[in-house]
Amino acid sequence: MKTKAIVLGILAALCIAAPFLLTGFWVRLITFTFMFAVLASALNIIAGFTGYAAFGNMIFFGLGAYTTAVLMTRLGFSFPPALACSAAVAVAVAIVLGMLLLRLKGHYFALGTLGAAEAMKYIVENMTKITGGGQGITVPSLRGNPAVINTFFYFMMFGLLIIILVVVWRLSKNRLGYAFKAIRANEEAAGVMGIDTTRYKVTAWALSALFTGLTGSVYAFWFTYIDAPTVFDVMWVVKMFVILLIGGAGTVFGPVIGAFILETISELVWSRFINLHLGILGLIIILVVLFMPRGIISLVSQGKGIKDLIPVRRQAKGADR
Amino acid sequence: MNGVILSGRQVTKTFGALKAVWNVDFEVKKGEILGIIGPNGAGKTTLLSMINGTLSLTRGTITFKDQVISGLKPFRIAEQGISRTFQVVKPFPGMTLLENVSLGALFGKDKIRDAREAREKTRAILSTVNLSGQENVAVENLNISERKRLELARALAMGPELLLLDEVMAGLNTGEINWIMGLIRRLNEKEGRTILVIEHVMKAIMGISHRIMVLHHGEKIAEGPPERISNDEKVISAYLGERYAKRRGDNA
Amino acid sequence: MLLQAVINGLLFGAVYATIGIGFSLVWGVMNIINIAHGSFIMVGAYLSYTLYAVAGIDPFLSIPLVMAALFVIAYVIQKFSLNRVVRGSVFITLTFTFGLQILIANVCLLIWSADYRSVKLPYSSAGFQIGEVVIPLVRLGIFAVALILTGLFYLFMRRTKTGIAINATALNFEGAKTVGIDVYNIYAITFGVSAALAGAAGCLISPIMSVNPFVGGPLVAKAFVIAILGGLGSTIGALVGGMVLGLVETVGTVFIPSSYQELLGFSVLVLVLVFRPQGLLGKRFY
C-alpha cells in the first residue's frame, strides 16, 4: 500500500509540474488524454462496475457542451454557472432516461441508449434558433497568454480526473459500489438481497452522466467551437470502450492507463498514416478484444504472462475433448 | 391471531394451464419452525418464491407482520425482514466469500451503512457457519458444503426475522446434515428466528420442525405435528402410492 | 403521389427484409449484434460495382458470386476470431464488431476511394405504368429477387440439415453440443449465411443507391430497426419489418420534412425497445 501511495504521489507531482516544463503541444496532448481518462472513468461507473454498457453515453457529453455553449453565448453566463448547469442538465436527463431505459438488458440497453443519443443529436441540431443548428456555436474564449490558457485547461481536466478517481476509488470499497457490483454480477439475486436495483442503476448512470457532462462543458469552453455531429459522435464512446478494454473495466486506474496507451498509439501511428487511422483503430479493437478483454490491469494484478492471453474459448474446447 | 407472523390466504400460482400452487392457506407462528414437504413438483419452492417476492401471485394474498407483502418487489420484502436460500446456489461471481455475504448485511433488514461495520458483522456470521478461514476465497472455488453454508450465511447476514430455507441439506453427508440441524435449532431457539424449511431429508425435517405442512400437486393435503403427519394416509399415499397406504391401513 | 410512395416502399421493403434476416439471424443464434453487417452490405455493393465496371456483369447475375465471396470472408472471420469471444458479454462483442466495421470501412476506402460509386444500368429507366403509378423494371426485379432469397432462406432454415442444426444451436447450445453438432462450425456457417445475404442485398441496392465507405453505419442502423420491428427468430417477421420500414420511409417523406425523419426513426426505435422489445412478431425461433 505504501509503495502505491508513493508512486501515485510522484506521478501527481509530475503531472503538476508538467505544464511548466513542456511545450504547448505536449500540454494540450496530455490535457486531451486526461479528458479521455475522465470520460472512460465515467463510462466505467455504469458499464464496468454496474454492467450496463451505455453505448450512448456521449449524449451527456453533447448535452454538457451545448448547455454551456448556449448559456454562455445566448444568455451571457460566465463559465462557472454554465458548468454547474451543464452538470445539472446531464444528471436530470440521466435520471429521466434511466427510468425508461435501465429496465432493458444487455444489447437492448446498449442500443437503446445509442438511439436516444442519436435522437438527441437531431433534436439539438434542429433547435436552430437556440443552438445554431448545423452551424454550431462559438463560445467566447478566454483572453490572454496562450500558454496560460493551455495550463488553465490542463489543470481543469486534471482536477476533474483527480475528483473522479477519488470517487471511483471510494466506490470500489463502499456500500454504493458493492450495490453496483452486485447488480452486475447477478441482478435478480441482488434484488433478493435487498438491493433496490432501479434506484442504484439510475444512481450509477447519473454519476456517470455528471462527470461526462462536466467534461463536455469544459470541452466547449476549451475548444470554443462545437457542433452537434462532433459532440454527439458515437466514436467518443467507442474510444471509451476501447480504453476500458485496454486498461481494464471495473478497476480504478484502468481507464487512466488505457487512455494514456490509446493516446500514445494515436500520436505515434495516426498522424503518420492518416489514411489508415480508422483501420488501425479497428485492428486495435479487434486485437484487444481477442487477446486481453480484461485489460492490462488484470494481467498485472494476477501475475499473468503472455500465455495467459489465450482467450476464453480454448478452455471450452479443452473441456470438449 | 396472536403470534402469527406470516399468513397466506388462497395463495395460487398458475403458469398458463399448469397449477403450480393452488388455493393454499397457511399460517406461521412467530418463533416456530414450519417444515414443508411434498413430492417433487408439489409447489414447495414456488410457494417460497411467492413469499419472498421472486414470483408474483396469480391469486391470493400473503401477509407478514400484518402487512400485505404479496405484490411487493423482492428487495422491499427483504427489507421487511424475510430472507431465503436458493436450492441451486449461485453466488455473486467475481467477489470473495466475505463480499458475497456482507451484501446481506449492507442491504438486508438492518441496512448497515458503513462497509467496515458490515464486514465485521459478516465475520461473526461466517464463524457461525464455520467458514471463517475462507473469507477471501473466490466463490467459484468453494465445494458444495461450503456453498450451502455461504448461502445460509448470506441469508443470515440480512438479519431476518423470517428465514426461508430451500433444501439446504441437499447433497450433504450425514455429519453435515446433523450439524446444520443443530444450527437451525440454535437460530430458532437462541436467536428467536422463525424458520420455514423445505427438505427432502425426512429424518432431518421431521426432527427439527414444530409443525409440518404437506403439499401435493400444488395443494395442501395435510398439516400438523411431525408424528401425526408421518402416519397420515394421504401423505403416505402421495409419497409412496395408494397401494402402499392401503396396505398399511389394512395392517394397522 | 401517396400510392406511388406506398408501392415504392413495398418494393424496397423486400431488400430491407433481406438485410434484416441476416442481421437478426446472427443476433438470434449467437446473441451478437453485428455492427459490421452494414459493411458487409457495402462490400457486396462495391463488389457488384467492380464486377460491372470491369467485366460488365449485371448486378443481378453477380449475386451468386458475391454471396459466395462474402460467405467465405465471414466464415473465416467467425472461425478464427469472433468464435473466441462469441460467448462473451455485450461490451466485448459489440465493441469487436464495431472494430471490424471500421476496419472494413478503411479497407474499402483504400481500394475504392471515398468517391460515391453506383451501377448505371442501361435499362434503369425502363418500366411500366399502372394508372398513375410508375414501376421501374429494376425495382421490380430487386423486389422479386429479394423475395426469392427470403423464401430460400426460409426453406434453408426449415428443411435442410444445416438449417435445423442452426436452430438447435440457437435454442440450446449445450444440448446441441451433446447431440453431436459442431457448434462453433455452425456459428461460422451462420455468420457466413448472414454475410452472404448482406452481400446479396448489396448487389441489389447497387443500381439504385450510390455507395461510399461510410454507408455501413446507417445501413446497420436500418438492419437493427428491422430486426427489432419484426422480432428475432421469425423470417416472416423480418419481411414484415422490412416492409414497414420501407413504407415508413417513403410515406414518411410525403408527410414529414426530411430533417425530422431520422428523429422519427430513432424515437420509434427507442419506444419499441422500451415497450415491446420482442418486436411485432418475435417468437422463440425460426
Image (tube, coloured by chain):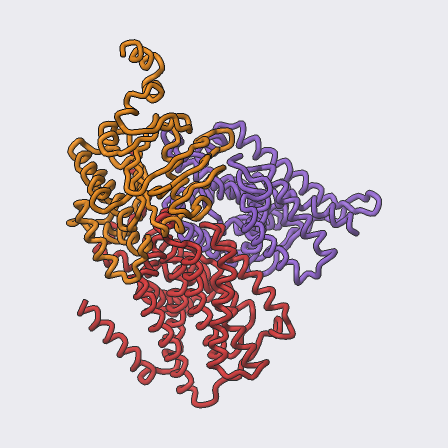
Q: Residue at x 41, y 59 (%)?
A: A46
Q: Tell me where residue A279 sits by quadrant.
A: bottom left
- Residue beneath the point at 29% across and 24% down: B228
In the rendering, at what x and y percent does residue B67 appear?
42, 48
Q: Position of residue A5 (x, y in %)?
A: 21, 71
The C terminus of chain B sits in image quarter: top left
Q: Nearer the viewer, residue A294 or C62?
A: A294
The colour chain A appears in is: red
Q: Is residue C57 visible?
A: no
Q: Quadrant of the N terminus of chain B?
A: top left
Q: Say if C224 sits above or below C152 in the image.
A: below
User: Chain B's colour?
Assistant: orange
Residue C184, x across and y down, in percent = 39, 38
Which chain can be seen in purple? C
Residue C7 left/right relative to C49: right
Q: Residue furthest bottom?
A: A144
Please tell me which residue lies in front, A141 or C65. A141
Which residue is nearer to you in this view: B160 or A266? B160
The relative height of residue A66 versus residue C124 in the rendered view (above or below) is: below
